[in-house]
Amino acid sequence: GYNAYFQDLFASPRRSHISPHLKWEGWFATLGDIGTLKGKVPTGVTAGILRLLRYGSRSQLEALAELAGREEGFDDKALTLEARKRLQRVLEKAHKAGKVTEEEVLDGVLELGVAHMWMHEWNQCSECYKRAKE
């Protein structure tokens, strides 16, 4: 299952008009156990997210990016950008190994460009769009 504290903190009904159990259940399940609450400080959750950014699988990083994103998630620009950056590195490595298509890599480049745009990082955004266009 998914971490109950993380779900309550970021996906409570206060954050969304749709029940988080319906809207985000699959993404939380994909993330797996990402930490626990120790006392009043969410250090376990923070460490879990950092661990995902460092060692997460493609599916976990995609779920994290969607959960943190603006359209479907809880609108965290910085976390979305970091998840997209790491996901792009995973996609590039998988492409070199012949496990993903070039189209999947370029889709990732476009998503990374959107994340840079959202953070007002225009130069990086431009670079991503130029690369995808080539």
Image (spheres, rainbow, N blue to C red):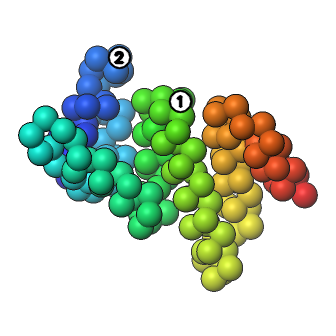
Q: Is residue 2 something one can see in this rendering? A: no
Mark earlier in primary sequence (1, 2): 2
Residue for point 62% across, 60% down:
88
Q: Is residue 127 something one can see in this rendering? A: yes
The foreground one among 81 and 129 is 81
* Image spot of residue 113 (x, y percent): 72, 44
Position of the C terminus by quadrant: bottom right
Residue that numbered label 2 is attached to: 17
* Image spot of residue 83 (x, y percent): 51, 51
The foreground one among 71 and 41 is 41
Look at the numbered disc 2 and give the secondary structure of its residue. Answer: loop
Neighbor class of circle 1 (other Cα within 10 Å; few <14, some 14-19, many 20+) is some
Residue for point 23% across, 47% down:
43
Residue that numbered label 1 is attached to: 70
Q: Which mark is residue 82?
A: none
Task: Say if 8 sits above or below 53 in the image.
Answer: above
Q: State which quadrant residue 68 falls in.
A: top left
